[in-house]
Image: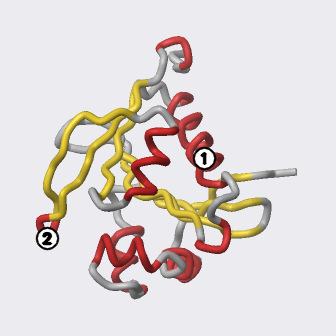
Amino acid sequence: MMGVHFEKITRENLYIALEILNSNPEYNLLENGKETRTISEIEEDLLNHMSESVLIMLDDTYIGVMDYIMENPKDHCPWLGLLMIHGDYRGFGFGTQAYVLYENMMLERGIPKVRIGVIKDNVNAHRFWKSLGFVYFKTTVWQNNREITCYEKNFPKEALNLN
């Protein structure tokens, strides 16, 4: 049994990421001011040289999208930019499982902490990230004057793979 795992997003499977993103119209409205995205909009977000983008899979079913950068040039920290579970699969703990897999990847790479930014009005996301041990460190303003709450999670030194 494979459970939750990741598959790199490519041009060939980008349409799957689009379907997942468009299954969450309330998030798209918060982020972009409209309920759906187009393939060209997400291509710029998910197929670039700055971030790593993956589809989240449960066995052989695509259930989510994750996008992260290993080093933000502004603070030299890794940032998890997006973790979204398909609307049909939300509420089953798959987001937590995907995050734990991501965190384990960061620990294996010897990364001491990760950061995230959450749109101020995304109440469910604030609750989710706090439940995973993320703590507030600042508020900033992002594109279109949207307020972003920034959280970070420091990993215990003994958990890091420092080989």
Up-down relation of residue 27 to residue 36 (above or below): above
Q: Residue furthest top?
A: 158
| Marks 2/1: CA–CA distance | 29 Å
Front-lying residue, 69 or 37: 37
Residue 18 location (% of width, % of height): 50, 80
The reply to whether residue 103 is in sight is yes
Q: Which residue is mark 2?
A: 144
Up-down relation of residue 144 to residue 36 (above or below): above
Three-letter amino acid code at the position of disc 1: Thr
Q: Which image quarter holds the C terminus?
A: top right
The residue drawn where x is 27% and y is 80% is 33
Seen in the image, is 59 located left or right of residue 20?
Answer: right
The residue drawn where x is 54% and y is 60% is 54
Name the mark on residue 119: none
Up-down relation of residue 107 to residue 146 (above or below): above
Numbered disc 1: secondary structure = helix
Front-lying residue, 74 or 154: 154
